[in-house]
Image: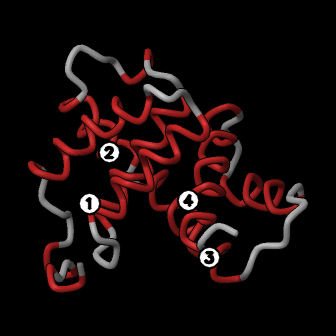
Amino acid sequence: MLRKRTQSRECALQILYQYEMNPEPMPQILEKFWSEQDETYSEETRRFSEKLALGTVEHQVEIDKVLEKYADNWELSRMAMIDRNVMRLATYELLYLADVPPKVTLNEAVNLAKKFSQEESGKFVNGILDKINHTEKPKNPKDHDPSAA
């Protein structure tokens, strides 16, 4: 059984994938996504999934600029869609969510990339996200509490 936040990240990744494949308004995508799930997810899992997906989409322009800055010799449009969305999701966590330790975000992103993309994707995703983690500052510094890690 997956941990709730791991489950949430998997759901959020699938929601972001659907959003990129068929850009409809997010409420429609969320409604459709949850109605198609065989598994019953806890309210906590659903809430965190939606927070991740909605936050990533809300800040996608800024997130994409950060990713392009650190993805040496890679255009976002040329990356595998899963890899791109894993990195968007993780970059959102790194820059906008104070309650998630960066180490957890990086580890979860690598695992998502390995599970849903290719084995080598883990290294690719880790390399870019590690640079972002060590260079970029959180967007809401007052919300970031280093002792929360």
Where is residue 74 shown, x and y percent of the image?
30, 17
- Please tell me whether mark 3 or mark 4 is closer to you in this view: 4
Q: Which residue is labeled 3 in the image?
A: 47
Q: Is residue 143 above or below residue 77?
A: below
Q: How many marks?
A: 4
Rounded to the nearest angstrom, the CA distance separating label 1 from label 4 is: 16 Å
SS at circle 2: helix
Q: Quadrant of the N terminus?
A: bottom right
Rounded to the nearest angstrom, the CA distance separating label 2 from label 1 is: 9 Å
Q: Which mark is on residue 9?
A: 4
Residue type at numbered disc 3: Arg
Where is residue 138 shown, x and y percent of the image?
18, 63
| Number of other residues with Cα within 10 Å of mark 3, as a class: few under 14, some 14 to 19, many 20 or more | few
- Left or right? Give the position of 113 relative to 125: right
Residue type at numbered disc 1: Leu
SS at circle 4: helix
Q: Which residue is labeled 2 in the image?
A: 63
Residue type at numbered disc 4: Arg
Q: Earlier in the sequence, mark 3 or mark 2?
A: 3
- Please tell me whether mark 1 or mark 4 is closer to you in this view: 4
User: Which quadrant of the view contains residue 69?
Assistant: top left
- Please tell me whether mark 2 or mark 4 is closer to you in this view: 4
